[in-house]
Image: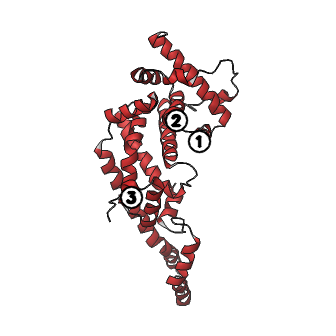
Amino acid sequence: MNNFKRLQEGEERLHPPPPEIEDNLFSNLHILKLLGETVELYVPRVGELFISLLGGSIKSSSRQEFSASQDSSNLAKKDEDIPPGKGKGTWNNFQDELD
Amino acid sequence: MGTDGCSKMTDIDVIRKYLKTQEPSYFSLLYQKYAGKIYGKCISLLKEEALAKDATQEIFIKIFMNLCKFEEQSKFSTWVYSITYNYCIDTIRKKKKLKNIFSNDMEKAPDLEDEVPDEKLLAMEVSRLKVVLDNMPPGDKAVLMMKYQDDMLIKEIAEALSKTESAIKMKIKRAKHKAQRVYKELYGAR
């Protein structure tokens, strides 16, 4: 172990990270995660809301098509193509966009 | 969900588990492993506890937000330290209102001096090395820490700081000279 590494060890012993960093960090991460989940849940509805606000209506058939396209087998197939954490509209994708 | 028995997991295993499950306890494992090192580096570079506290928190948020972008091409520790050094350098730059901590003319600077052997730098007493590093410009201190403390390769340092490899080689060479000069000023030729 060289002197630079010994210096780092000494600094770590002398200045341990204060516990409030961990508390603040994990409460912030919790909020971010909650925000991401909320966006994930409601963003697909924003389009519909806009159409409604503009006085339009959404055909029930298109809604059915939308829900049919989301059946579990279809999703499972899609998930196979997408590496973990890279799916469109997922929390991680939202993180990418935030970044 | 518990993470018992996870202490032997590699960083990559923990990251994969976290990305798959989104279980905070896995991210907590990464925090436990790196918080001390990151906070230590922040204290060493920023020299203020309050700044170092904020920096550590922000760096972990950056890690959390970008974890899915980690491509496993380098060690996780290298990636984490790159974020740490960049954040600290950026903070110092903003605090001192400097445009760039690493001057761009370093690539053009003439190569007049001989290389200081690593042994000279590594033979310094730890307490003296701390004083020497504290008396050096933050950019020089950072490159020396990256090379000798974190064993980062020239290529990795260049990527982390968005500089060319030749610019980093020159920067390290000059930083070593500066360290030796500061040492001589403070402690003579001893």
Task: Identify the mark nearer the N-term, 1 or 2.
Answer: 2
Where is residue B63 shown, x and y percent of the image? 46, 51
Which SS class for mark 2? helix
The answer to whether the residues at label 1 and label 2 have Cβ atoms under 8 Å apart is yes
Q: Name the residue: 48% across, 70% down.
A: A43
Residue B26 is tagged as 3
- Chain of residue at mark 3: B
- Label 1 belongs to which residue? B156
Q: Nearer the viewer, residue B70 or B119?
A: B119
The answer to whether the residues at label 3 and label 1 have Cβ atoms under 8 Å apart is no
Task: Identify the mark nearer the N-term, 2 or 3.
Answer: 3
The quadrant of the image that shows the N terminus of chain B is bottom left
Where is residue B62 shown, x and y percent of the image? 47, 50
Residue B146 is tagged as 2
Asked if residue A2 can be seen in this view, the reply is yes
Q: Amino acid at mark 3?
A: Tyr
Q: Name the residue: 36% across, 49% down.
A: B32
Say yes or no: labels 3 and 1 on the same chain. Answer: yes
- Chain of residue at mark 2: B
C-alpha distance separating marks 2 and 3: 27 Å
